[in-house]
Amino acid sequence: MTASRSENPAGGRCNLKPSRRTILKAVAALSFLAVGTAHAQQFPSKPIRLIVPASPGTSIDAITRFFSDPLSKSLKVPVVVENRSGAGGLMAYREAAGAAPDGYTLILTGIPLYLLPLFSTSNVPTFDPVKDFTPIARVARVPFAIVVASDAPYRSLPELIEAMRRKPKASTYSSQGVGSSAHLCAVTLNTNSQTEALHVSYKESSMATTDVAGGRITFTCQTSTGVLPLISAGKLKPLAVTGSQRWGVLPDIPTAVEAGVTEFEFSSQLDFMAPPGLPQDIATLLSQHLVRIARGPEFQQFCIDQILALEVRDREDLAPEIAKEVAKWQSTARLAQAR
């Protein structure tokens, strides 16, 4: 009898001495765990940047800046917000997709994540909304308001719709770029109400909204951040909101569905994404911190104040949603391209 083998009940021999291949596999597995642990222990060790695919003062900018301070305190490193609004946010998405997969670059994404690649010309480098990003966490959804100038003749959304039906393409709507949330919101409105209006594209949402207030554009669909100050100043008139509920600050303004546009609910998801190839342990760590902040009372109050619909998903729950979002928004994009 030797130390390297023993008799088994069937009469054969069982080698008790592990093979060289088994030892190498065990060492590789332990090394992988060690590297993962090292990632978590060493991260973060320098400032983290949060890229905003929009200009300062927009809704997505305000939300990103809300998360920067508590995330900085939670991770004990500076968190810097960087605005990249060029080409409707395309520059921001490309920059985030091409950043190092080390956890030090995140971007807060919305509908344009899925739409910009479809609207970009063939000679402009773009990105893949699935392959070029690592899902981290969803924190909320943003509804929109359909607004006209305060002195516009329309007193309700049905009146605006009727005017567009009487004179197809005589009305105009503005947005902050082809493929932007505002653009797709108006396209969805026209599709659901079987109307037509001409799209006028601007570089920024503030310009798109200002020209509606000045009577140069018929209507626009914008977030609360962009329209509430002008509504309060008496320069814009809200006709309807696009979410499933009325806004607390505009209790008399109906949802689009209440106003008669059946099955028209429109909101933009807000997801934190990282570059592709991010180590799972770092992705999980970032997701845990962002989800904890999103579920806290401060962010819940922020959502109430900013007219956001709280919707929190960690990285594991968010990943399966991405394919659904791609199919949903690409279908909407095809409608926009057909008009």
Image (tube, rainbow, N blue to C red):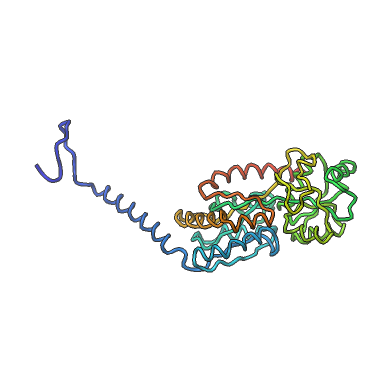
> Is 21 on the left-hand or right-hand side of 103?
left
Image location of residue 13, percent across then percent down: 16, 37
- In percent of width and height, residue 73 lies at 52, 66
Counting from the top left corner in percent of width and height, residue 299 is at 60, 57
Q: In percent of the image, x 51 and y 63: which residue is there?
A: 74
Point out the residue furthest to the left here: 1
Q: Quadrant of residue 237?
A: bottom right
The C terminus lies in quadrant: top right
Q: Residue furthest top?
A: 10
Q: Relative to residue 152, is residue 41 drawn left or right? A: left
Q: Quadrant of the N terminus?
A: top left
Relative depth, front residue between 172 and 308: 308
On screen, residue 185 above or below 7: below
Q: Residue at x 29, y 51 (%)?
A: 24
* Residue in front for this viewpoint, 181 or 59: 59
What is the count of numbered marks? 0
Q: Is residue 154 left or right of residue 99?
A: right
Residue located at (15% from left, 42% from top): 5
Task: Give the quadrant of residue 30.
Answer: bottom left
Question: Residue 194 lies in what quarter of the image?
Answer: top right
**Residue 131 locus on image (x, y percent):** 55, 50
